[in-house]
Image (spheres, helix red, strand yellow):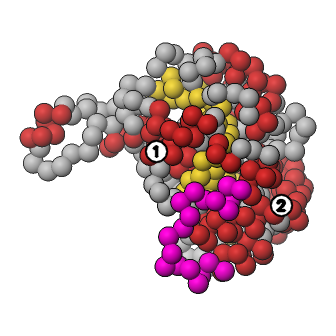
């Protein structure tokens, strides 16, 4: 943190100065979508759904084209009802946002005063911290030994200024997960004044029976918010639809500060259709399930260290320093061949690349390219 300007200094400044802390924030860096000199690169840098999106969602999206002049339903009613029904949740406990990113931001805004803090894993998703810093709150990081959330480390990091704890399970960029028994142990030891946010952005890809997203358990608690998104499994990242299931009081608090029309008609309709398309969801999960095991095994065979096992639609690959092959060089090597992966320097992981599971030919191309890179 740089020295924060006093309010007096800001009043006397020659030009407007943002409030303290804002300029210390590292703006979110999205995954690369372009490579110099390569036409139609393969984007494996943002964990999007490689199968695209549901044809039914596309149809619903197109249907909204005739109503672009109309404000969307501020309650996100059709999607609220669809989600409430599908997951047997109380409709009024749902929060909608411009992606789940906005749900995180709203929670931060409603619960953080300057000097408060949030707790997250040391490799925790960047969007959590950006919103907290914007509220002039601190971000406290809990160690993640072996690239995995450690419940005791998370609990140790809590103090009396902690208002929220963010836990992406499975995590991004690590891809790792913790069993629900561990989440329960975490919740039981957490002060009841702290909100536990269980970010389930990748939860559908976590197929181990010891995993749960927490929706069922959250029903009976006063301090758990479970979030989900249409950006990953459902392949609707462009439409920006996310949601949270919160205790009624938290949902009501957030509802006071959200922008009135924060989900679009096209987004609402496409999400309703996507939610009902079980076939597309099942195909997406089966594809990821098959290829992430293959990719992890192949990359491991090249001498890379794969965090995991991954329960997401990507793998985190570590380049051992001893091999003299760096993640940065590998990223350049892949980019030059039209394969876009994600560097994760901003997560304190300079020796890793995050690679989204692609179609068969993409995955094979990644392995072939990295094999050539490691041998070169
Ligand atoms: C992609 C992702 C999200 C979802 O973001 P949206 O704003 O809903 O697109 C949430 N959490 C994590 C950890 C993610 O990787």
Ligand 1 contact, mark 1 (Cβ < 8 Å): no
Find out whether the residues at labels 2 and 1 contact each other: C-beta distance under 8 Å: no
Q: Is residue 75 magenta?
A: yes
Residue located beneath label 1 in the image:
256
Residue 38 in the image: x percent, y percent?
Answer: 60, 76
Counting residues from the start of the chain, the first of labels 2 and 1 encountered is 1
Residue drawn at 56 percent across, 80 percent down: 67
Residue 201 in the image: x percent, y percent?
Answer: 69, 48
Q: Dot 2 surroundings within 10 Å: few (below 14), some, or many (20 or more)? A: many
| Residue 218 shows up from this direction | yes
Tell how many labels: 2
Residue located beneath label 2 in the image:
281
Residue 157 in the image: x percent, y percent?
Answer: 56, 19
Q: Residue furthest bottom?
A: 66
Q: Quadrant of the N terminus?
A: top left
Residue 323 in which image quadrant: top right
Ligand 1 contact, mark 2 (Cβ < 8 Å): no
Residue drawn at 59 percent across, 29 percent down: 195
Residue 18 in which image quadrant: top left
Element class at badge 2:
helix
């Amino acid at each position: 943190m740089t020295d924060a300007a006093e309010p007096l200094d800001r009043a006397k400044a020659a030009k407007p100065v943002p409030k303290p802390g804002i300029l210390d924030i590292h703006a979110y860096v999205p995954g690369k979508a372009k490579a110099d000199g390569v036409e139609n690169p393969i984007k494996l840098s943002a964990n999007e759904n490689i199968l695209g999106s549901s044809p039914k969602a596309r149809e619903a999206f197109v249907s909204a084209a005739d109503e672009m002049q109309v404000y969307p339903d501020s309650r996100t009613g059709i999607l609220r009802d669809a989600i409430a029904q599908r997951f047997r949740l109380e409709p009024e406990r749902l929060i909608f946002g411009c992606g789940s990113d906005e749900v995180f931001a709203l929670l931060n805004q409603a619960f953080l005063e300057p000097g408060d803090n949030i707790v997250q894993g040391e490799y925790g998703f960047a969007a959590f911290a950006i919103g907290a810093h914007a509220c002039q709150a601190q971000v406290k990081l809990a160690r993640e030994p072996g690239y995995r959330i450690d419940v005791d480390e998370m609990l140790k990091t809590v103090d009396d200024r902690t208002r929220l704890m963010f836990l992406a399970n499975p995590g991004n960029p690590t891809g790792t997960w913790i069993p629900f028994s561990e989440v329960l142990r975490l919740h039981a030891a957490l002060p009841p004044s702290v909100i536990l946010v269980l970010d389930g952005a990748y939860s559908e890809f976590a197929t181990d029976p010891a995993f749960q997203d927490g929706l069922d358990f959250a029903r009976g608690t006063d301090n758990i918010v479970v979030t989900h998104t249409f950006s990953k499994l459902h392949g609707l990242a462009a439409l920006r639809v996310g949601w949270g299931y919160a205790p009624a009081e938290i949902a009501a608090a957030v509802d006071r500060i959200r922008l009135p029309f924060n989900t679009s008609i096209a987004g609402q309709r496409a999400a309703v259709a996507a939610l009902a398309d079980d076939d597309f969801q099942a195909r997406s999960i089966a594809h990821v399930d098959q290829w992430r095991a293959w990719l992890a095994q192949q990359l491991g065979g090249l001498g890379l260290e794969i965090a995991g096992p991954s329960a997401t639609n990507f793998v985190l690959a570590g380049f051992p320093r001893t091999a003299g092959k760096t993640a940065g060089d590998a990223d350049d090597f892949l980019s030059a061949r039209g394969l876009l992966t994600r560097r994760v320097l901003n997560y304190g992981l300079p020796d890793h690349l995050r690679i989204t599971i692609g179609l068969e030919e993409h995955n094979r191309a990644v392995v072939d390219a990295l094999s050539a890179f490691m041998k070169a």
